[in-house]
Amino acid sequence: MSSPTPRVFIAATRQNDGKTTTSLGLLAEIRKRFTRVGYIKPVGQRFVEIEENKIDEDTVLMDSVYHLECPLIDMSPIAVEPDFTRKYLQEANRDFLVNRIRSAFDRVATDKDFVLVEGSGHAGVGSVFDLSNAQVAKELNAKVVIVTRGGIGKPIDEIALNKALFDKIGVEVIGVIINKVIPDKLAFVEEFARKGLKRQGLDLLGVLPHRPTLSRPTMHSLREDLRARVLNDGHSLNALVEDVVLGAMGANNAVKHFKRGMLLITPFDREDIIYAAAAEQDREVNHLAGMVLTGGCEPSPSVLRVIGRLPFPVLLTPCGSYQAASIVHDTIVKTRPDDLQKIDLIRDLIAEHVDVDRLLNAL
């Protein structure tokens, strides 16, 4: 690796601590300070296929939002496919992988003033194939910012654990960003977390308040997770799901739970509930986020006509109601390129609550 371009590596203490959210917001702020900014996620675990290349989802998000003018394959050089680890353990090829990451970074960094490197989780993720986040940061000669979840005691314990591995590998951790803090406790957490981190030799770079909007899935993401198809065209799938109700009771009881932003999950043959939902939508205040029909079979033609007139998307999934409810409950909420409301909120959060200049000066 030959590029001298300044860089920072964003890691986390756990899955879903807000690493990608932080990276998305930091890119916006860094672009205010540097004309040409690059991005790379060296090792990706959730990917999509684009022109026969497996590209990490977060890379697609960053490129879609910021138009980074760099080949996607360079910003996402390694995709961990389902059999990736097995193949590696059978025949280790670390040098090949390291060279691929280094070469990709050099291409990303060409003519750039700064590069943001997004890791794939905590310091040890990837150890099984000799490319933990700590090892990747070392190979890229990058200093690290750790993102963790709100609180004081548990986050600092987890940060200390992660820092120990970065220290062992020889990578400097320059600071911490604490995410998803209850707004009323923001000042309290900032004061005492700063004191606790100082005892670990770490700087607190920012504390982000929890915003429920960022934790809510859209109908678009649920459609993919449920392997569902849309039964009524022309409706936006960007609606945020704020609550979920399982339509397993009588229609008269089900309507009592209807409210704006709610997702209704019910079997395809519960025509009484479908008709009740349609009747309630005449009152705009009760517009649902959407409806999921389970069981995989289409409703009758008369019900499909009613569904076609509904002002929200209706999905049909092959899953049963319990399975569908479980999938919705366990959905990992990822920001998507068309989540414009979320993206604007993320940018504002980072701009207001993270000392970006302090971060850059630490590099």
Image (cartoon, rainbow, N blue to C red):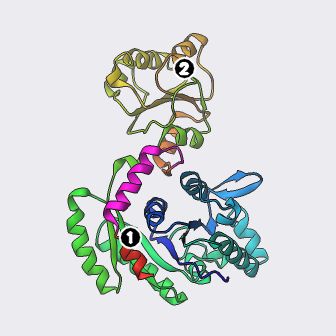
Residue at the image point whose x is 27% and y is 58% from the top: 182
- Asked where in the image residue 139 lies, by quadrant, the reply is bottom right
Residue at (62%, 29%) from the top-left corner? 296
- Residue 257 lies, in percent from the top left, at 33, 28
The location of residue 47, given as percent across then percent down, is: 65, 56
Q: Nearer the viewer, residue 28 or 32?
A: 32
Position above or below: 110 against 285: below
Q: Quadrant of the C terminus?
A: bottom left
Residue that label 2 marks: 269
Nearer the observer: mark 1 or 2; the answer is: 1
- Label 1, on which residue? 356
Q: Quick one: label 1 or label 2, which is nearer the N terminus?
A: 2
Q: What secondary structure do most residues of the magenta stretch adopt? A: helix
Position of residue 120 relative to residue 167, above or below, is above
Instruction: Name the residue at 59% across, 77% down.
Output: 132
Query: In which quadrant of the rendered view does residue 96 lie?
Result: bottom right
Q: State the extent of the magenta-drawn residues as a range.
A: 336-354
